[in-house]
Image: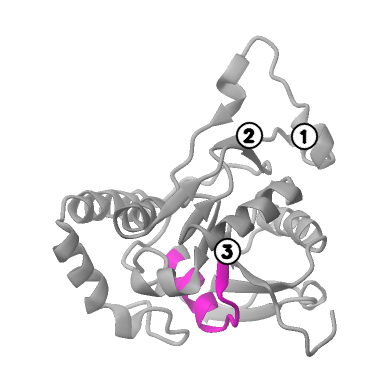
Amino acid sequence: MHKNKPYLFTYIIAYKHNLDRLGNLRKVLEWLAGFSGIELIIVEQDNKPKLPAYSLKGFKYIFTESDKPFNKAWAFNVGVKYSTTPAIIFGDSDIIMDPNNMIESLKLLQQYEAVSPYDRVIDLERSEVNMTLPQMDQIQRPGRGETDVQKICLCGGIIMYRRDALERIGGFGSESFIGWGGEDDFASVLTKRFLNWYERPGKCYHIFHEKVKPNMRYYQANLNLLQKLSAMSNDDLMKFINSSRSRTGLKNKCADK
C-alpha cells in the first residue's frame, strides 16, 4: 500500500507469549496479509518483550509491561490509542475465518455500530491446523452432528466496532478483569445494552493449542465482577464506565498495583 493512502480499518491483536501462541499468531498474520487497507496492531503484554524481532514486520508493535496474568481488555484498549481508523476490529491470536465473510461483515458497520462476523466457532484439531480455509469449511465430525461447533459470546474471538460507538461505551469492556474469563462477556453486555449491534450468521475457526489452566483466584474474581456489573442498571453501568475513562488504555499505567 502506498504510504499516503489511508487505512480502511484497524485490526488489534492482544498477545501473551508461549510457543503455541506464537505459532497460532503466525497463522493469523498470514491470514490477515490477504487484506488490503488494514492497519494491524499487536499489543504484547508480559514482564519483558518476547516476540522475536523477525516477527515484527508489517504491523505496529506495542509492549505493555505487567507481571500479572494477561489483561486482554487493557491490551485492546492500548491498541485503540494507537489506531487511526474509524473502524476497529478486535481479534484473538488464534481465530481465522473466511475473508469474504469478514469483508461483508465490515460493510455492515455502515448500518450497525458493532458487528460480530459469525455466530459459531469450529475448534480445529491438531491435525487440521494446516488446512486451507476451503478445506476447513468442509470439516465434518462423523457421528457428532452440530457438536463440532460451539456458541461464543458476542464479543468473543473477533468483534467489530465503529470508533465513535466504541468510545461511547468506554472501550473494550473493563480493565478490571485480570486473567482469563469474563472480559469478553462484559464487553458483550455493554455492546448489547448501549449499541445498535448485529451478529452475522457464519462460522470461524479456532486454531488448536494446548489448553492453559486459568489462575482460579483471578478467574473467580472475574466471574464475581461480571455478575455484579451485569446486575447494574444502565445508568449505574455507565457511571462505572465513566469512572475509569481517564485510565483506560494507558500504556504505562502501573497495572500491578
Indicate whether residue 156 is drawn in magenta. no
Disc 2: which residue: 122
Mark 1 to mark 3: distance in Å?
Answer: 23 Å
Dot placed on the residue nearer the N-terminal end, 1 or 3:
3
In this image, 204 relative to 222: left or right?
right
- The N terminus lies in which quarter of the figure? bottom right
Return the mark for residue 136.
1
Mark 3 is on which residue type? Ile
Residue 237: x and y in percent read: 20, 63
Residue 101: x and y in percent read: 69, 47
Can residue 165 be seen at all in this image of the molecule? yes
| For residue 130, above or below residue 7 | above
In this image, 59 relative to 172: left or right?
right
Mark 2 is on which residue type? Ile
| Circle 3 residues within 10 Å: few <14, some 14–19, many ≥20 | many
Q: Check disc 3 and report its element: helix, strand or loop.
A: strand
- Tell us which disc is closer to us: 2 or 3: 3
Q: Check disc 1 and report its element: helix, strand or loop.
A: helix
Say which quarter of the image contains residue 62: bottom right
Mark 2 to mark 3: distance in Å?
Answer: 20 Å
Disc 3: which residue: 89
Say which quarter of the image contains residue 187: bottom left
**Viewer-nearest residue: 207 or 32:** 32
Query: Is the C-beta separation of discs 2 and 1 under 8 Å?
Result: yes
What range of the chain is rendered magenta?
Answer: 73-89
Mark 1 is on which residue type? Met
| Circle 1 residues within 10 Å: few <14, some 14–19, many ≥20 | some
- Tell us which disc is closer to us: 1 or 3: 3
Return the mark for residue 105.
none
Q: Residue at x 34, y 61 (%)?
A: 177
Q: Check disc 2 and report its element: helix, strand or loop.
A: strand
